[in-house]
Every structure is written in structure tokens, then in C-alpha cells.
Amino acid sequence: MSTAELFDVSLEEQVACVERELGYRRRVYARRVAEGKMHERVATVEIRRMEAVLATLKQVAQGLGRG
């Protein structure tokens, strides 16, 4: 994927994508933890990392006057 193609994805689309991904991870990780296939600590850390990505994108959007 070229740099130009990366910037074809708007900041708003990126935020929406990360929000969907967070919802997905919360559902899937909860199930995996319950099934003993994932440690709760790993699930928590991974979700916190994605929440940080979302917060960063929102800060960038706010700095650009979009949020």
C-alpha cells in the first residue's frame, strides 16, 4: 500500500474503525478468557493499548479541528 493510499482513509474513518475493533476485542477476549484460552491480564493490556490508539486518534482529530 502506498503512502497516498494510506491517506485516502480519513481520520474519522480511522476512529470509527478503532471503535469497532475495540468492541470486537472486548467481546472476543471476554469469551477467550472465560474459556481459559487467554489470560485476563493479556486481554486487559491489549484492550488498553487499543484504547490508547483511539485516544491518540481523537487528540489528533481535535488538534485538526475535527473533534
Image (spheres, grey):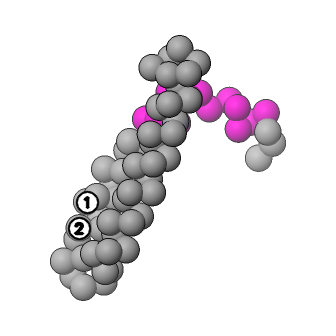
Task: Name the image quarter holding residue 49.
Answer: bottom left
Give the percent coordinates (x, y) of residue 55.
44, 39
Residue at 43% across, 35% down: 16
Q: Which residue is mark 2?
A: 30
29 drawn magenta: no
Q: Gap between marks 2 and 1, in whole Å?
A: 5 Å
Which residue sits furthest top?
65
Q: Which residue is mark 1?
A: 27
Q: Position of residue 14 (x, y in %)?
A: 52, 36
- Please say if 60 is above or below 2: above
Q: Is residue 64 left or right of residue 51?
A: right
Q: Position of residue 53 (x, y in %)?
A: 49, 47
In this view, 6 is above or below 30: above
Left or right: residue 36 versus residue 58 is left
Q: Residues within 10 Å of mark 2 (few under 14, many from 20)?
A: some
**Residue 66 placement (x, y as % from top left):** 50, 17
Q: Residues within 10 Å of mark 1 (few under 14, many from 20)?
A: few
The residue that appears at 34% across and 69% down in the rendered structure is: 43
Vertical position of residue 56 compared to residue 63: above or below: below
Determine if residue 13 is in view. Answer: no
Magenta: main secondary structure: helix
The reply to whether the C-beta atoms of the residues labelled 2 and 1 are less than 8 Å apart is yes
Q: Relative to 36, is 47 on the left or the right?
A: right
Tell me, yes or no, if residue 1 can be seen here: yes
Instruction: Say the numbered circle drawn on residue 35.
Output: none
Q: Quadrant of the C terminus?
A: top left
From which residue to which does the magenta span run? 4-16
Would residue 6 be counted in the magenta stretch?
A: yes
> At label 2, which amino acid type do we have?
Ala
Looking at numbered disc 1 in the image, what kind of residue is underneath it? Arg
- Seen at 33% across and 55% down, the residue is 24
